[in-house]
């Protein structure tokens, strides 16, 4: 059970990274979160090299770099939409919309690819998705009834967070198809890559995100504020710690633990984000909504 404990520790650091993002949104003197994100992505890019320095000595695989870059662009969009959602509504439920999106990429990949690629959709997965949707509906309904705290714009941004994260996770999971497609044949075999080349994925993801975010920041013609420096650095370090712990968990996981790592991480992050939102910002902890979302993630991912 050590791997599961490490997975929950990774969730704690992920929730901490989200908390620093929330604090920056509240304390930064600027409406834009560009300064925070420049530092966040810079630290993420550097640490992705630190984790796997051998990438600097290997040949570039442009297919992997392209996919990683696409995920990086989606991540930028996600962070900006999340920033707007945090300004118009509850932090806990905003991050719940993000984390529960992990249930749906499997269905999208099943619809996109032939089952020979290893994707399936079982009744349990559909039940898990149903629980997630019901949980999010309950949470959104509760928040919409309190118009004094939640702007109508929040729901649009929250749905945007959900959709963008789902697309990013679909690309992240779907890239694995390219590792074995040369054995299966078909049009994808032309894009087959060696699994060893996947080491370029994370540097490409965070490198492209850092470069694009730097351009956005420079167009604003301003300096980094103190909150952006502080919270951007802390959030980047927390994100690095979370990534390292997840990699460590996958390394030490026993066979029966491997399928439980990601749901433990997702549910742990969801619950911890809602916990600090309640303790620090007096947001309601919707027990029914959180329970249904958590159950849906476990059922959907473990199915």
Image (cartoon, rainbow, N blue to C red):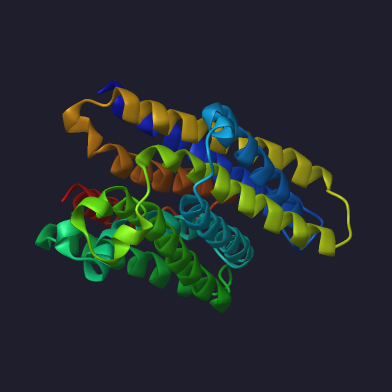
One can see residue 232 in this view? yes
Tell me the residue at 57%/76% (across/down): 153
- Residue 175, horizontal then vertical, whole percent: 37, 54
- Residue 149, horizontal then vertical, whole percent: 57, 67
As drawn, is 49 to the left or to the right of 67? right
One can see residue 127 in this view? no
Tell me the residue at 64%/64% (across/down): 87
Residues 147 and 289: in front is: 289
Work out which quarter of the rendered image holds the N terminus and state it.
top left
Going by the picture, which residue comes out furthest to the bottom? 152
Q: Is residue 279 above or below residue 161?
A: above
Tell me the residue at 68%/42% (across/down): 42
As drawn, is 91 to the left or to the right of 254? right
As drawn, is 101 to the left or to the right of 17? left
Q: How many marks?
A: 0
Q: Is residue 79 above or below residue 45?
A: below
Residues 146 and 204: in front is: 204
Tell me the residue at 27%/69% (across/down): 112
- Residue 299, horizontal then vertical, whole percent: 19, 52
Q: Quadrant of residue 198?
A: top left
């Amino acid at each position: 059970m050590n791997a599961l404990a490490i997975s929950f520790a990774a969730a704690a650091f992920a929730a901490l990274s989200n908390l620093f993002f929330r604090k920056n949104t509240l304390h930064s003197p600027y409406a834009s979160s560009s300064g925070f994100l420049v530092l966040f992505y810079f630290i993420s890019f550097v640490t992705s090299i630190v984790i796997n320095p051998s990438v600097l000595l290997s040949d570039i695989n442009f297919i992997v770099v392209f996919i990683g870059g696409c995920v990086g662009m989606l991540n930028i969009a996600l962070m900006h939409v999340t920033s707007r959602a945090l300004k118009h509504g509850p932090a806990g439920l905003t991050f719940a919309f993000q984390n529960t999106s992990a249930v749906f990429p499997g269905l999208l990949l099943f619809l996109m690819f032939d089952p020979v690629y290893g994707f399936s959709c079982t009744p349990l997965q559909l039940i898990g998705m149903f629980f997630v949707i019901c949980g999010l509906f309950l949470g959104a309904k509760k928040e919409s009834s309190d118009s004094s705290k939640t702007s109508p714009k929040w729901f649009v941004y929250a749905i945007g967070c959900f959709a963008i994260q789902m697309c990013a996770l679909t690309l992240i999971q779907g890239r694995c198809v390219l590792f074995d497609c040369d054995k299966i044949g078909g049009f994808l075999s032309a894009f087959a890559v060696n699994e060893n080349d996947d080491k370029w994925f994370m540097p490409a993801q965070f490198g492209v995100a850092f470069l694009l975010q730097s351009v956005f920041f420079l167009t604003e013609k301003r300096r980094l504020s103190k909150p952006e420096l502080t919270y951007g650095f802390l959030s980047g370090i927390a994100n690095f710690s979370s990534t390292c712990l997840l990699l460590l968990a996958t390394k030490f996981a026993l066979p029966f633990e491997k399928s439980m790592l990601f749901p433990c991480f997702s549910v742990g992050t969801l619950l911890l984000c809602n916990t600090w939102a309640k303790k620090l910002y007096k947001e309601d902890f919707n027990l029914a909504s959180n329970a249904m979302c958590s159950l849906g993630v476990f059922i959907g991912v473990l199915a």
